Amino acid sequence: MRGLYIHIPFCKHICSYCDFPKRIAKNNEQIETYIDYLLKELDSYKNYFNDIKTVYIGGGTPNMLSDELLEKLLSYIANNISNPIEYTIECNPELLTEKQISLFLKYKINRVSLGVESFNNEDLKKLNRYHSKEDAIKAIYLLKEKGISNINIDLIFAHPFDNIEKVRENLEIFKSLDVKHLSYYSMILEDKTVFKHLYNQNKLTLIDEDISAQMYEEIIDTLISFGYHHYETSNFARYGFESQHNLLYWQEEEYIGVGAGAAGFINGTRYTNSPILNKYYKGCKEVEVLTIEDIKKEYMMLGFRKIDGISLSDYKARFNSEVFYDFSLNKLLTEDLIEISNGMLKLTTKGIMLANEVFMEFI
């Protein structure tokens, strides 16, 4: 099974924390040129289309495309890829329209991911988001009313303006909306972002790590009490609504990435397209052929992101080897960061809180 990721790098504005490949479009002609090239790049992967089971259109802001360009892209996918089991598009709440939702339904998109980030209007302004709490709630109700109930929302915690009370308020509002899936990410201060620039000038103070850990623990406990399955370090779902596309990444399955800055993993080779449009149009990309040792390390690091962990039998079947032969895990076991349970090697409760320390062992 393979996934297909399609990257739309254009945004109406740039959020203060975002380091994804993105840009503000000069004009609609620039976006038209991009979509035309994107379809040509998709053509180059046609031999793989029969195995595509998940499609994910991300960004950037995919729903800033005009209705005409959006339909051009969606009709291409519909004509070339048959009935993916999961078909997701990312949307900004303030840009979502009934016409867009009609196109989603027409072309069988069955999952929408909304970039909400917070339900606190003051924090949204400080994060340089252009929607309000009311816009986000309206978008969720509109999707449900039109027949799309498989909705994810993204939230961010431990940003510079956050506190435990705001986290609790976000969770209570989320509960009231009865959304199937939540990605609740801890903010990471990334290079080449507005926040990093402000931090370097001593104009921004970050949340204390202990407070961030308290927030994370509160998020996990609260969402589990609400009946959500904590299935990946930052992801929670009603049972049966886990993100199938993201699970492909975490299970180290193959996926195709198209678009400026998009990455793919096929036949043991990882590639990353140039995020610079002119270079992307020339086919510039970084290519890395992974060794079996590289693949094993990535399998472990990605596998530990899943709360259920790594199947020891699956590892043996995949690599014809044993986990404990290939890796020295005594330190992680001794420090109570990982454990073995029912044939699964997984993070402990302590390990979930300190997951990055576990991941670093495989980098």
Image (cartoon, rainbow, N blue to C red):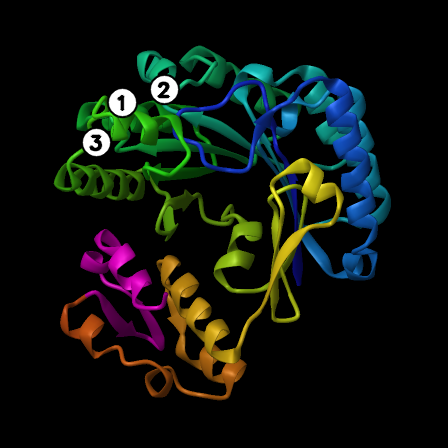
Q: Is residue 274 left or right of residue 314?
A: right
Mark 2 vs mark 3: in front: 3
How far is mark 2 from mark 1, CA to CA? 8 Å
Type of amino acid under label 2: Phe
Mark 3 vs mark 1: in front: 3
Inspect the magenta stretch and tell me whether residue 353 lies in it: yes
Q: Which residues are magenta?
A: 337-363
**Element under label 2?**
loop
> What's the mark number on residue 51?
none
Residue plotted at (47% across, 73% down): 294
Cβ–Cβ under 8 Å for marks 2 and 1: yes
Q: Locate the C terminus and report the quarter of the image it occupies.
A: bottom left
Q: Is residue 81 left or right of residue 347?
A: right
In the image, residue 332 above or below residue 87: below
In the image, residue 245 above or below residue 212: below
**Is 160 or 213 nearer to us in this picture?**
160
**Is 327 or 167 nearer to us in this picture?**
327
> What's the mark number on residue 169?
1
Name which of mark 2 and mark 1 comes first in the sequence.
2
Q: Locate the N terminus and report the quarter of the image it occupies.
A: bottom right
Type of amino acid under label 1: Glu
Residue denoted by label 2: 119
Residue plotted at (61% across, 33% down): 9
Residue denoted by label 3: 206
Please tell me in which quadrant of the rendered image residue 166 appears: top left
**Element under label 3?**
loop
Residue 72 percent coordinates (x, y): 82, 31
Question: Crowding near pointer 1: few (<14 within 10 Å), some, many (20+)?
Answer: some
Please tell me in which quadrant of the rendered image residue 261 appears: top right
